[in-house]
Image: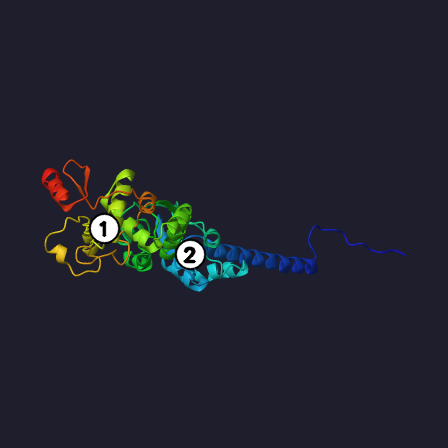
Amino acid sequence: MHVDIPKHTGAIPRTFRGCFERSWQRWVLAFVLGLSVAIGYGIAFSPPADFPVGSIVSIAPGASAPSVATQLATAHIIKHPRVLRALLRVAGASDRLQAGAYLFSTPTDVFVVAYRLVTGDYGIPPARITFPEGETARDYAVRVHEAFPDISESSFLSLAKPYEGYLFPDTYVFSPSADAGSIVQTMRTNFNTKTASLMGDAGASGHSLSDIITLASLVEKEARSVENKRIVAGVLWNRLKLGMPLQVDAVFGYIFDRDTYSPSLADLKAESPYNTYTHKGLPPGPISNPGLESIDAVIHPTKTTYLYYLTGKDNQMHYATTFAEHQTNRQKYLP
């Protein structure tokens, strides 16, 4: 049998050519669509053109993922809130956002933003604050606000004021996520830790912790050296025992909220329960936050018969047992 075999001309048969063309068109279409999607996602994920380099955004405690996404979009940190929300939802991290202040020093894509929010990568070094002995909660509020501008003085003071005297003066390092409540709690915990070794002797002294801290706050303002703190503490305990008014000038700085406490004659008559000239006994509470030396001095005072003291123009403290001796010291050592 003879079979004619068509010669190969190099051309693709029409039927195959049609299939190829349709396949090629589909691939082109798929490529274009894929490229468009990739570009679209790239645009959505990339940082905004007007990214505010060096800006700080504060995320409030308990803020929801939608509100944070909107906040960051408004601040031009991200382009589309929905993209950030979707990433957090897929990662199961919508409820794990870390509150605090975030520094965005360079343009950052939305993936990195999401990661930082979940891990608390603030980009800001911890805040170091030193709270000196003898300052008040109001003084501390100023220091906290300087380190954490988002914490107002009033919000810190409202939480700290009830613990006047028990905010332990020290140098602290706080996370950028710290708030007024956590700062106060850290200072209170430090107070308990630092004074723990003194509590046994405090209980044995026969005085309440409240009285000890209140008197220590006066001593903190009245004396500088450990020796003088112990003597002044003994003097004040002696006056309390005899029912004499303490007549401590330092209270007027607290009453009038000022640094200087050299009272005028009018000040001495001020209507305040903290006025130790017009009211016998201890003030209603501490007038400052005393350090460990002052607290220890009140628990372990130097026992003397002194009832009076003053700081002379020679910057030395001078003591007296009688009022006549005190008057002599005033004439000799005061300007």
Tell me the SS state at disc 1.
helix
Q: Is residue 53 left or right of residue 34?
A: left
Give the farthest residue toward the top.
Answer: 314
The quadrant of the rendering that contains the C terminus is top left
Point out the tag, 2 or 1, that comes first from the N-terminus: 2
Label 1, residues with CA under 10 Å away: few <14, some 14-19, many ≥20: some
Mark sitting on residue 239 = 1
Residue closer to the observer: 74 or 150: 150
Give the farthest residue toward the right.
Answer: 1
The residue under the point 42% across, 56% down is 99
Q: Is residue 193 left or right of residue 319?
A: right
The quadrant of the rendering that contains the N terminus is bottom right
Q: Is residue 305 left or right of residue 61?
A: left
Q: Is residue 327 left or right of residue 297?
A: left
Whether residue 45 can be seen here: yes
Residue closer to the observer: 123 or 87: 123
Q: Position of residue 59 (x, y in %)?
A: 39, 57
The amino acid on which the numbered mark 2 sits, given as a three-letter code, is: Ala
Tell me the SS state at disc 2.
loop
Q: Position of residue 81 (x, y in %)?
A: 43, 61
Mark sitting on residue 294 = none
The amino acid on which the numbered mark 1 sits, given as a three-letter code, is: Arg
Q: Label 2 vs label 1: CA separation? A: 51 Å
Residue closer to the observer: 168 or 181: 168
Circle 2 is placed at which residue position? 99
Q: Position of residue 296 (x, y in %)?
A: 34, 44
Label 2, residues with CA under 10 Å away: few <14, some 14-19, many ≥20: many
Q: Give the vertical position of 318 relative to 243 (above or below).
A: above
Kindly report which numbered mark, 2 or 1, lies closer to the viewer in this rendering: 1
